[in-house]
Image (spheres, grey):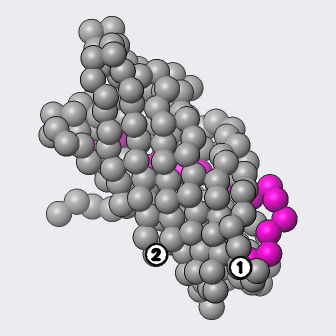
Amino acid sequence: MMKKYFPSTLGILILFAFNNPLFSQKFASTASEIKFYSEAPMENIEAFNKDGKSVISGATREIAFAVSIRGFHFKKPLMEEHFNENYMESEKFKTATFKGKINEETDFKKEGVYDVTASGKMNIHGVEKDYAIPGKLTIKGDKISLDSKFKVKVADHKIEIPQLVVKNIAEVVEVTVHFDYEEKK
C-alpha cells in the first residue's frame, strides 16, 4: 500500500485554519483529481492523481493544496518509474504544493459559478515559483468545487530532461485540477 505524504506547510496551514477565528468559513477537500498532460513529438504522456488535499478560508480567501508526487499513475509502469526516479526524484521531493489567495472578492455563501484567479507560491521539485492560476469556483449550498487548467514549464522547477529523451517529454506540461470541498464547522 502506498504511503500518503502531507507536507508540513499544508499541515500547519490546516491546523492554523481550523483553530483560527479569522477562518470562520473553512472548506476542506473531500475529493480531488489532478492530471498532467505532456504533448511531445514522439509520444504524449498523461498521468492521473487522486491524492490531492486542499483547504480554503472563506473569510480570507486563502487557499492551499498539496499533491503526493508518487500519487501520479501512468498507463505504462516504466513511465511511472522514470517519472518518480529520474525526473521528479519523488523520494527527495515528496509533494507539490501551492499556497496563495483567491484574488476576487467571493461570497462563499452565495451560490453561483465564479471565474477566479489564485496568486501564490507553487513548490514543485523543491523549487518555489510565483503563479497566478485561473479557475472556476462553483458554490452550491455548503459544497464547493474548483476547476483549473494551467501550464508548468519543467525547467522553471529544475526538472532536467536528458537529451536522449528530449523528444519524448514536453518542456511545458498542462495541469488540470479538480477539487470538491465541504464546509467544516
Residue 47 relative to residue 57: left or right: left
Quarter of image, res 14: bottom right
Depicted 24 relative to depicted 34: above or below: below
Q: Residue at x 35, y 54 (%)?
A: 49
Q: 29 or 39, which lies in front?
A: 39
Calculate the distance from the C-alpha at mark 2 to the C-alpha at mark 1. 19 Å
Q: Residue at x 65, y 75 (%)?
A: 139
**Residue 16 visible somewhere in the drawing:** no
Q: Which residue is mark 1?
A: 111
Q: Is residue 100 magenta?
A: yes
Q: Residue at x 57, y 69 (%)?
A: 145
Q: In the image, which disc is placed on residue 33?
A: none
- Screen quadrant of the C terminus: bottom right
- Secondary structure state at the residue bearing disc 1: loop
- Secondary structure state at the residue bearing disc 2: strand
**Residue 2 visible somewhere in the drawing:** yes
Q: Which residues are magenta?
A: 90-108
Quarter of image, res 137: bottom right
Q: Residue placed farthest to the top in the image?
A: 163
Residue 127 relative to residue 161: left or right: right
Q: 106 or 99, which lies in front?
A: 106
Residue 140 relative to residue 105: left or right: left
Name the amino acid, label 1. Glu
- Screen quadrant of the N terminus: bottom left
Name the amino acid, label 2. Thr
Q: Which residue is mark 2?
A: 30
Q: Is residue 140 magenta?
A: no
| Disc 1 packing (10 Å; few <14; some 14–19; many ≥20) | some
Marks 2 and 1: CB-CB under 8 Å?
no
